[in-house]
Image (cartoon, helix red, strand yellow):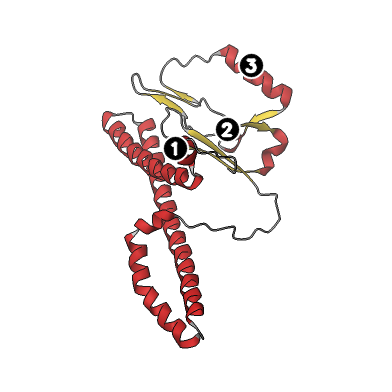
Amino acid sequence: MDKKGGVMTPRKTVVESISCMQSELDLIDIWRIKNPDTKSYTWSQKSPNVFCRFDYWLISNNLQDFAKSNDIIPAIQTDHAAIDLVFTDIDTELKGPGFWKMNCSLLEDENYLNGLKQKVPEWKAEGERVLPDKRSVWDWIKYNIHAHAILHSKNKAKERNERERQLQNNYEEATKIFESDPSELNAIRLNKIKEKLELFYEEKTKGIIIRARVCWYEHGERSSKY
């Protein structure tokens, strides 16, 4: 069930070691429990074509009912797929929207800047009609700039998340097609989609680095407050 191609004789020592550990600690392979008849793999090679499921979530048996979802998902910069496990949320505490911080990359976003150029005169005119002095008008303009930046950031995040989801779906689909038919054409298609996904995550990582101020640490600044 967990291998395709290559030598199909199981490595008994490894299998027995894992089975013994599962028995002693009451562990289960949650992916196989939830997917009893599914063939899916976390590692492959092209010459010769071999596919294996090497990676597992072995969880305590009494957590089985709390496993909301588990899946094999795309991973980049590695020859293994990622394994994903989600538990039901047992935290009932209500949480607020959190703290928003300005992303300076917005200042290079033409759509955001064009929106400001259009809106600022409108906010200024609106403030001058109803507010008593220029300082109040200035605070009103700043408030609206803040709200506009948050809205624009949320919309960009939704678009980025949707693009990421689409790329992941395309990669998963291409992977399954390649696993069922490891032809050269399917391999080329899979590599092209993987390159797009890697480029997307490189751009996403740059944003994380900027927000984390990693460059301060790399250039010798003290990072005690981080």
Residue 84 or 183: which is nearer the viewer? Answer: 84
The residue sitting at 40% across, 36% down in the picture is 176
Element under label 1?
Answer: loop
- Per the image, the residue denoted by label 2 is 32
The reply to whether residue 77 is visible in this rendering is: yes
Of mark 3 and mark 2, the one earlier in the sequence is 3
Of mark 3 and mark 1, the one earlier in the sequence is 3
> Which mark is nearer the camera, 3 or 2?
3
Give the label on residue 74, or none: 1
Vertical placement of residue 63 versus 48, above or below:
below
Residue 192 or 177: which is nearer the viewer? Answer: 192
In-image side of 81 versus 96 (left or right)? left
The residue sitting at 26% across, 33% down in the picture is 185
**Quadrant in the picture for the C terminus:** top right
Element under label 3?
Answer: helix
Q: Are marks 2 and 1 in contact (CB under 8 Å)?
A: no
The reply to whether residue 38 is visible in this rendering is: no
Vertical placement of residue 138 versus 89, above or below:
below
> Which mark is nearer the camera, 3 or 1?
1
The residue sitting at 40% across, 58% down in the picture is 106
- Per the image, the residue denoted by label 3 is 17
Please, what is the three-letter code of the amino acid marked with disc 2? Arg
